[in-house]
Amino acid sequence: MVRRTAPAVARPGHTEEQHPEQTPGPQFIAPVAQETPQPEVAPQPEVSLRKEVEHPHPLTGIARSWIALFGLVLVFGRDIAERGLSSLAEMNPFLWVILGLVLAVIVFNLVWGLIEWRTTTFVADDEEFRIERDFLSRDSSRIAYTKIQSVDIERSLPARLLGLSSVTIDVGGAGGKKLEFLAKQRAEALRDQLLARMKRQADSPIGADGEPMELAPLPEAPPVHTVVAVKPITLFKGVFVSSFLPWLVAGLAVLGVMLTRGEVFTFAALGGVVFGIGGYLWTQIVNNWNFHLDKVPDGLHMTRGLFTTTSQSLKADRIQAVSIHQDYLQRLTGLYRMRVTVLGLSGGESGQTSGMVLPYGTLDDVTRVLAAFWPGIDLDAIELHGQPVRARWLTPLGFRRHQWGVDDQTVVAHHGWLDHTITLVPHRRMQSIEITQGPWQRRLNVARVFLHTTDGPVSMDLYHLDATEARQFFDEQRRRARIARTTPGEPGYLSALPAPAVERLIPGS
Amino acid sequence: MEELFRPPNAQWHPLSPSYLTLKLLMIGINWAIIGAIIIVPLVLLDFTWWWAALIAFLVFWAWRFLRAPRVFRRWGYAETDDDIYLTRGLLWRELTCVPYGRMQLVNVSSGPIERQFGLASVELVTSSTSGTITIPGLARPDAIAMRDRLIERGELLQAGI
């Protein structure tokens, strides 16, 4: 059943005044125009367009307190397993205090989880997406669909055991929300709904007759097409046969020396080696386990993780620049790593892994991923120019590799001596452009051109171009970027996005 | 100016001459303080070659003074229909082009000393921090007029991200 939504009064931009239409019947919630708390209603059966209020999953409390539980089991479980329950009586009082504290934390988390379950509600339908919390202080957050930049699903290990997921909604800056925890299917359906509505609202918020358009019911499970999946063997090859290998060998050598010759053993060194090497291995292998990139109708999903699985949504039009990198040892295995500068992902929590769209893949995988978000870009067809010979004085090692090329959509640059980096910036995504020339470069009559893009791990730097060529490129690129910016009917992945929520004195799109 | 840094239209607009005066004043004050911090301990510690250090410092200071007008002449900005250009630098030269459609924010600010000279600087913020440029040393009415012009053109040509 599709319900026709309210007339134009309740359009986006309009704040908390609810639509005046009150559908009769005891099953619908009174709209929240007043401050009185709304009556709690049991969640309705899943009909996508009716206004319904939903709660997080009741097992939220258990999923939250897993760290405490884990610690508890770790500390006391071994003892109990070895000596039986009677050992509990023999523990000294200090341990009793610790046990008590941990149990208190667990109970607290359980109770908090139950409270959150009862007092958090959310509504996700055609007009709005609203999350309300009602414990001690009332908190009602309404998120406009057009402001949603990405929706991520994260499943920690205990959450997976319980069949739950947490959903993080990013609006680019402050104001993002996290819903913990929902049942797995509901979380995925919610993500699909949010992304689909975000796209529809962006495309056509008001129908031709001034009324919001009737939207067809959303598909139950959108078809998923896997673009690339990183197999475990590829992951291991990529991590171990890379610039990390010398460090690993050195670390193991240090460990070996310390263990065989006792007198040089120090805890600090041991800790350094274990945490340094182990930490890197952990982030690379555990966080990238079973990485796969899927294409869905509304964008791309990146899923990865061994214990905690995260699934990030990515839209092609948010990608600003791409960097493909292969370090000197990876040339032996032929693997590349691919990073992007994406709006909203530059400061991700996982640090190094954010912005990584392909942790380890062959050139074939790279081409497929590029085609998934930038269809029509053919790296091989772009004609490449090199540096003038006299630039060898300044960069003798990287000279042969540094090449650049332009086609009608992007600029591409190759860098590196032993390693190899390919950087791509579409004309549409260039922010500003700069020429610099230091005193040595002036002697050799070469200059450097920077293309600025939004902040992120990718930067585009064409260095030591012949000075006349540099100025020519500067002028032409300026013109190409202007044309790309103002051309309507460009490919969807290059469409203009509203500027991020920076305080703006220049109102505009 | 050489070919690489030629202006996009007829010529570069220079900064206000009071900016040069401000710079000379700042060189006088800042380096005097730094010189004092370096030289006075050498004197107090009875370092035998302190007078050589003093002479070297004075030569360096004179060089900064003589260099300042040339650096000042290297500053320039130009506005065309679509972009604004800024060039600067004597040894390390730069030329930046920021399209109006990419500007997110235009800031006019004056520090306490700048205010004494009636100067202000205009900062153009884009969504790329390395692409954000600052044009210093404009007369305050000029700076405000430039900001208004930029905002007007930015509104017309705003191109999102």
Image (tube, coloured by chain):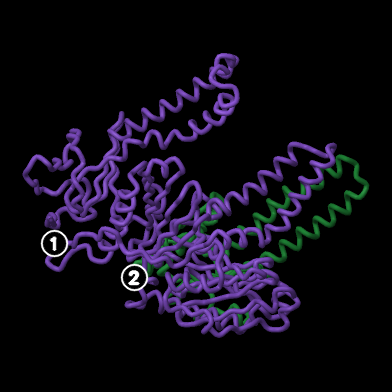
Chain colours: A purple, B green
Q: Which residue is mark 2?
A: B156
- Outermost residue, left direction? A24
- Outermost residue, right direction? B48
Identify residue type, mark 1.
Answer: Glu
In terms of secondary structure, where does tag 1 sit? loop
Badge 2 crowding class, 10 Å Cα cut-off, few under 14, some 14 to 19, many 20 or more, is some
Q: Is residue A41 above or below residue A310?
A: above
Q: Quadrant of residue A25?
A: top left
Q: Which residue is mark 1?
A: A211
Chain on which label 1 sits: A
In terms of secondary structure, where does tag 2 sit? helix
Q: A78 or A387: which is nearer to us? A: A78
Task: Give left or right: position of B75 versus A321.
Answer: right
How many numbered tags mark residues here?
2
Q: Position of residue A461 (x, y in %)?
A: 59, 71
Q: Quadrant of the C terminus of chain A?
A: bottom left
Please say whether residue B32 is visible from this viewpoint. Answer: yes
* Residue depicted at x 85% and y 37%: A263
The answer to whether marks 1 and 2 sit on the same chain is no
Q: Position of residue B79 (x, y in %)?
A: 46, 73
Q: Is residue A41 above or below residue B62?
A: above
Query: Which disc is residue A29 wearing?
Result: none
Chain on which label 2 sits: B
Q: Position of residue A379 (x, y in %)?
A: 52, 79
Task: Give left or right: position of B146 versus B6.
Answer: left
Q: Quadrant of residue A57?
A: top left
Q: Quadrant of the N terminus of chain A?
A: bottom left
Task: Give left or right: position of A283 versus B99.
Answer: right
Q: Position of residue A280 (x, y in %)?
A: 62, 51
